[in-house]
Every structure is written in structure tokens, then in C-alpha cells.
Amino acid sequence: MEKFDVLVVGAGPAGSTTSYRLACAGARVLLVDRARYPRDKPCGGGLTMRAVRLLPFSVEPVVEDRASDFTFGLDFDHRFERRAKAPLVLLTQRSRLDEFLAGQAAEAGADFRDGTRVSDLEVTADAAEATVGSSRVQAHALIAADGANGTTARAAGIDDDRDYGVALEGNVPHDALDPETYRGRLFLELGVVPGGYGWVFPKGDHVNVGVGGWAREAPTLRGHLSRFCREYGLDEGRLESVRGFRLPLIKPKTELARGRVALVGDAAGLVDPLSGDGIYEAFLSGRLAAEATLDLLEGRAANLEPYAHVVRRSLASQLAAAWGAKMALDRFPRLTYTAIRSPYVWKAVESLMGGEVPSPGAMRGFRRASLKVIAGIARAAGNPGKAFAET
């Protein structure tokens, strides 16, 4: 039987960064993924600078574009632009990003095995055992990082009950459009899908186009994507790699750890309900899981359950703000769009995405300005036409 300190199942951003941190600290880590790398994953591939700041190494080798310009639209009828003082989002492809992150973990000392399945998992009070490929493996701790459709959590006896959003995306090659229109700019179209939005993200040789919303919108997403392409003048016939995916959303009672098992990233449902982005949460949960695991291995903790409390405390402000904004956008799209146009709100968004503040709850300097915006929305609610006139 092969023995390790930690078995990490899933080599996406959460699993690989957890493995990297543990390996750098001297832990014996086995990182396993059933896919053969490089492998692609449905995702817009945007890394906010807030997320990048969590990494202990540079992702420069896989960056294809940088976005400091943003175009916001409302139901293809109204539009405004904002420019940040510095790039807020780095654009990459998940096939390249994930291979790079797994490579960083391997270089740090983790044993990375791709194209390998994990089965026959058994978890006791002292260890986790599983069949990894053709080998039987034992570890002191288990990190479930196998994504929204992973099975590790349930196999370990953890209730991973979550809500879901859905999205559909595809790529349009540069030879089918004018790349300069999209270079360095993100397009976000609000009010086109209930519970979500549409987007265009620039990449090195194509643009990524997608729509997402509530889970109930799954049967209609193809129609939403078709309309999005028409309205943006994109040739739907040139769409490549069209695929749909689920966005796992944590519930108040979702279990994040039990005994010597912890869930990270998408496997834990750690996706922002407003943006659908989960890479910041993946990096954050990876760091927190590594810290909790080292506490366990070094005898400072009896299990990984303290990790769950730290994650919830770290993300509480963000999740509350995101759910509030998501419901406002869904119910009052025009008023929300008007609020987003406020320079005060943009300043807050820029500071959050840029990593200048760690969470919405930390933006105390914007409290007075935010109250002004909220008061404006309240006044507009009595006369929506007047509030929207300037758009």
C-alpha cells in the first residue's frame, strides 16, 4: 500500500493550489485527476486580480489578454462603458491554466497522476484509503476537489447538497470577427437571461461567448445564446466547442468538511452566485484547506472541520452581497443597471475586483456613497421612467 499525508482528488484550480501549498510545506501529496492533461473545462477563463493576488506564483505564462475596459449592456438596448485604472481581469484558457497549476504542484513535490481514477474510497477516524489506478493508497487527509459533478464527497459520506445555476458557452475564432473590437475588453449583457447575463471574453485566438442563469433556464439557453450572437453580430455558424455546464452554489447547510475530509472549490459549491465565477473561491479554499490540513498533520487540530467555519466566515460578506445583487438584477434589471452606472458603485467594483479590498464587507469607505445610490434607486422605484431616461 502506498502511503501519503494527503490525497487530493481533482487537479483543477482548487486541488492544484491546495497540493502546491501542502507540498511546499513538506507534506507528501498525491494529486489525482481522472482526465488526461491538458484537458479543457467549460469556463470563461477570467482571473480577477483579486484571485491572482491569492497565488504564491505568477500565472503570466498562460495569460492571453488583460481587461481594463468593460462594456455593460441591458437587454441589447442600452449600453455604457467603464475603464479601470489598471487591468482587473487576466484572460486565459482553462486547458492551459489547469495544466500550468497542476505543473506547479508537481514541481513543488506533489505526485501528480492524471488519467487516473479513484475508487473504493473508505474513510475512518484516522485515515482515508482508496484505489488509485491500480494501487491501493492510504492518506492522513483527503481533499475533494473534483468539481461540480464529482463523487468524492458522497463517497466519503458528506452531504454535498447544493443549488445550481447553468451556462452555455462557445468560442468564435478571430478570423470570423474583428479582434480589435474585443481586445482588452469584457462585454457583459444584463437582463437577457433570468438569473444571469451574457458575456464576451477575449482570448489569444478567439473570443469566448456565453450565457448563464437559473437552473430552470437550461432548456432555453441555446435560444438565448443564438440571440446573443445575432445581437452582437457574431456568426453563430462559426461557434466552436459549444458546451453547457452546471454552476454549483453553496447552501447555508452544505457540509464542507467532516473528520479528515474537506471539500474545496466547485466540489464545495464555492461559486459566486452573481458572476458565476469560482476561481477566486477555488484559490481561497485551496489556501484555507492547506492551512487546516497542516494543522491536522502537525497535531494542532484533531480534524479538518475548523476549515468549514473559516471558509464560511471568509466568504459570508461576499455571498450575502452577491445574492442580494443577483435578486435585484433578476427582479429590477433596469434599476440595477442604473445603479451599476453610478461612479460610486463602479469604484467599489473596481476596488473589489482589483483586490484592493478583500470583501464587500470591508468597503466601509463606500458606505456613505452606497447609501446615496440606494436612496436614488428607492426614489426611482416610484418613477422608473425618469430613472432610466438618461440611459
Image: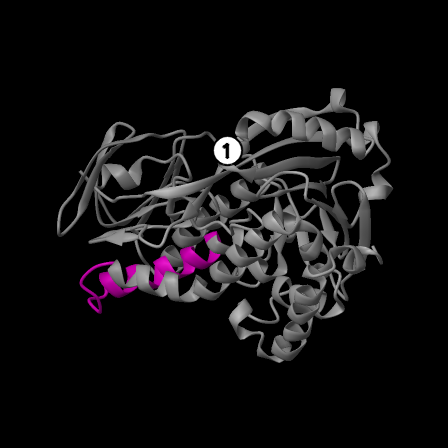
* Three-letter code, disc 1: Arg
Q: Secondary structure under badge 1?
A: helix
Q: Is residue 308 left or right of residue 187?
A: left
Residue farthest left in this picture: 125
Q: Residue at x 81, y 54 (%)?
A: 80
- What residue is at 61 percent from the left and 65 percent from the top? 352
- Check if residue 236 falls in the magenta segment: no
Question: What residue do we see at 85% from left, 58% from top?
Answer: 390
Q: Find disc 1 in the rendering and name its residue.
A: 216
Residue 95 in view, yes or no: yes
Is the magenta region chiefly helix, strand or loop?
Answer: helix
In terms of depth relative to the viewer, which is nearer, 31 or 145?
145
- Closer to the camera, 142 or 356? 356
| Image: 282 above or below 119 | below
Location of residue 163 with respect to 109 vertically, above or below? above
- List x then y, in percent, for residue 61: 64, 49
In this orientation, does residue 38 appear? no
- Residue range (magenta): 282-304
> Split into 4 quadrants, where in the image is the C terminus?
bottom right
Decide which of 362, 331 is in the foreground and name it.
Answer: 331
Figure check: 258 above or below 224: below
Could you say where residue 321 lies in the image, as x and y percent from the top left?
53, 62
Query: Quadrant of the rendered structure where residue 131 is?
Result: top left
Q: Position of residue 229 (x, y in %)?
A: 75, 30
Quadrant in which the N terminus is drawn: top left
Give left or right: position of 345 versus 99.
right
